[in-house]
Image (cartoon, rainbow, N blue to C red):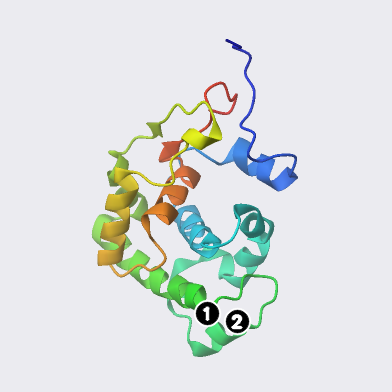
Amino acid sequence: MNNELTECNWPGSDTLMRAYHNDEWGKPLHDDRKLFEFMVMDAFQAGLSWRTILHKRENFRRAFDNYDVEKIALYGEEKIQSLMQNASIVRNQAKIRATVGNAKAFLIVKAEFGTFDNYIWQFTGGKTIMNHPTMNAEIPAKSTESDAMSKDLLKRGFKFVGSTICYAFMQAAGMVNDHLDGCRFK
């Protein structure tokens, strides 16, 4: 067996994908604004590639007021229609409206739990789940934890939070570490 540390192969040679893999994916995140950013990005990824969303990341930040949840929760029809005209982001009306609704639900959760971080990390007992895949095919698309997260988020009024989207969010937020065994970034 080769014990040499390598890297996961899914980012390929794409600079942004590699930076995301190396610096963010699987690393525990406890900042509410960043957690909301990943919630939005993962929702917009539905039906698209992560590469597409990652390459529009800065555009999304500008379009959604740097993920200021309080501002987004107040977006009205004029702002929603403005976002629908913004060619630098994914112009999906359902996802844009879900972002506004999710911001409102996010604030309710934050008020109940003190922070969204306190709420969301309960699904993994406050710890990162360390998986040990040896190849990409062993990385699951969802888990019992993402099933529970999805069910509770939906009950709280969130949209675009199916179990697969929740699992991708858990990877982004470092609630799950799915770096391949031997990856130097595990």
Give whichever of 152, 8 is nearer the camera. 8
List the residue tagged with mark 1: 93
Query: Which mark sits nearer the N-terminus, 1 or 2?
Result: 2
As rendered, which of 172 and 66 lies closer to the eye?
172
Furthest residue to the bottom?
Answer: 78
Q: Quadrant of residue 24?
A: top right
Q: Dot 1: what SS?
A: helix
Which label belongs to residue 60? none
Residue 52 is left or right of residue 171, and the answer is right
- x and y percentages locating residue 51 in the rendered image: 65, 53
Residue depicted at 45% across the width and 67% down the height: 69
Residue 186 at x, y = what percent? 53, 28
- For residue 87, side relative to residue 166 (left or right): right
Mark 1: few, some, or many residues within 10 Å (few <14, many ≥20)? few
Q: Dividing the image into 4 quarters, which one contains the N terminus?
A: top right
Residue 165 drawn at (x, y percent): 44, 55
Tag shown at residue 84: 2
Helix, strand or loop at disc 2? helix
Residue at horizontal 45 percent and vertical 53 percent from the top: 35
Q: Amino acid at mark 2?
A: Met
Residue 81 % position (x, y): 57, 86
State whether residue 63 appears in this view: yes
State yes or no: discs 1 and 2 in contact (Cβ < 8 Å): yes
Cα distance, mark 1 to mark 2? 7 Å
Crowd band around label 2 with a 10 angstrom C-alpha radius: few (<14), some (14–19), many (20+): some
Number of labels in the image equals: 2
Work out whether 38 lies above or below 135: below
